[in-house]
Amino acid sequence: MDRVNNLKKITKKKQQQFMMWFSMFSAVFFITVLMMMDGDLVKASVPQTHQEWLKPMFHVEHQQQKIRVEKVKSGDVAAMVLRRLGFPAAEANQIVVAARPVYSLRKIYAGKTITRTDQGDVITLLYDVSAEQQLRLTSSSQQAWVASLEDKMLSTRTLVVEGTIQDSLFLDAAKAGLEDKLTLKLVDIFAWDIDFARDLRKGDSFKVLFEETFDTQGKRVRYNILAAEFQNRGYSYKAVRYQNQAGSVEYYNQEGKNLRKTYLKSPVKYSRISSRFSNARKHPVLGYTRAHRGVDYAAKSGTPIRAIGDGKIAFKGWKGGYGRFIEIRHNNGIHSTAYAHMRRYASGMRKGRFVRQGQVIGYVGMSGLATGPHLHFEFRSRGRAVNPLKVKHKPANPVAKQELTAFRVHAKNLLNIMQQQSQAQTWG
Ligand SMILES: [Zn+2]
């Protein structure tokens, strides 16, 4: 009996020892695991400033946030992405069903992301629907999923950038803090009045008021030039962005005159004229003398060809020696333009389609009868071929009379903001 009791005592002691070791070991193990996991956790942001002063006196337990982001791949359906985010199949389906009344997750597409955030027992899913809206799905303590479509908190800021031409527009604009995309926009706005390749002089200057819009993650979703001023050889050109009541956005000067002309000067940028309009010349391929009813622009094969004005495609297809050919009718058919020898058409081109000025309709090639890649371009007025280089370029429509008062107030405001911000930024 005593022996048995003794044995029991020893066993109990061993058990206690074991329990002690086990709990110590598991505590160390648990802490190690926590530390390892820590690398994968994105913590709720806590201000880090002056952390070195504030030696932690005691440890405060934060409810940690765990964030996982999963990209939608091509061929994915929403349930597959949700599975990759750690939801079992049944729950993934519940989520899709819960979202349906506000947004169909069938519409998700490749390249977008779904973000899962776990905080305590609350799980949140976010999906970017558009630049302005996001889908939010929430479930707490394993309760049903609740879906809502919410406006992102977009924030907007305006900035003024100004500079003086020392070397080249792009260099000086970049130095002033204007990114190339905005410099290109600036060039497009004034291209009708200023020939940036030839007219720029040292000492010319520019001022640009632009607006940037950001989503909640700080990603820029939009940017636009609101107003600009260009001093070229002692003359000041001003531009103001304005959306007219018909809904189209244009740049006008302060008086409401459109800065854009009805037709572009040329359908190809970065080209040289290799043959001019004439009523009689020797054909380079056919050998005999024949009138040349257009202008040839020599350019690298594949250079984009732009519609020189708004209009409707009247013909698209192979046209004998012209090869791949597009004809556009402008201004109710009073004018038409033709583009020949294309290597290929831009996608979506077809007869009857409306194209905008500057829209790419095809690419330079040498289809049909041509000795090298070039664009053969014709301009017709009431059916008669005229010299495209001698067409008078009229300004596009000005601000409508009934909108002029509103426009003037708008223009004055923007130009004032540009002036004031530029002074505020340069006093230092
Ligand atoms: Zn030609």
Image: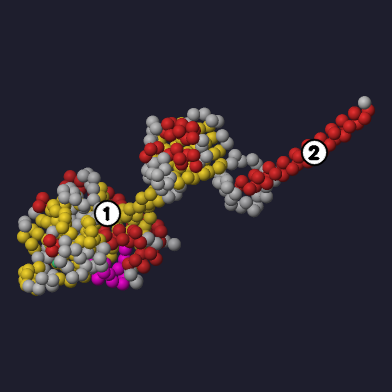
Q: Taking 185 as reference, is 41 above or below it?
A: above
Q: Nearer the viewer, residue 195 or 234?
A: 195
Asked whether 345 or 233 is in front, the reply is 345
In this picture, which residue range is highlighted in magenta? Answer: 195-206
Residue at the farthest right position: 2
Instruction: Point out which mark residue 240 bears.
Output: 1
* Tag count: 2
Q: Is residue 356 visible?
A: yes
Quarter location, residue 189? bottom left
Answer with the quadrant where ligand 1 appears in the image.
bottom left
Task: Give residue 15's position: percent from left, percent from top.
Answer: 81, 35
Q: Respond yes or no on whether mark 2 lies under 8 Å from ligand 1.
A: no
Specify the amino acid type for callout 2.
Phe
Position in image of residue 360 (x %, y %): 24, 57
- The residue lying at 68 percent from left, 42 percent from top is 30
What SS does tag 1 mark? strand
Name the secondary structure under disc 2.
Answer: helix
**What's the residue at 39%, 32% (across, down)?**
100
**For the C terminus, which image quadrant?**
bottom left
Rendered residue at 38%/55% (across/down): 159
Q: Say whether residue 63 is left or right of residue 351.
A: right
- Disc 1 or 2, which lies upstream in sequence? 2
- Residue 95, compared with residue 348, is above or below; it is above
The percent position of residue 63, horizontal first and vertical second, equals 59, 39
Q: How many residues crowd around disc 1 within 10 Å: few (fewer than 14), some, or many (20 or more)?
A: many
Magenta-colored segment: predominant secondary structure = loop
Q: Is residue 136 magenta?
A: no
Q: Residues within 10 Å of mark 2 (few under 14, many from 20)?
A: few
User: Splitting the image into 4 quarters, where does residue 1 fall?
Assistant: top right
- Residue picked out by circle 2: 18
Q: Nearer the viewer, residue 176 or 149?
A: 149
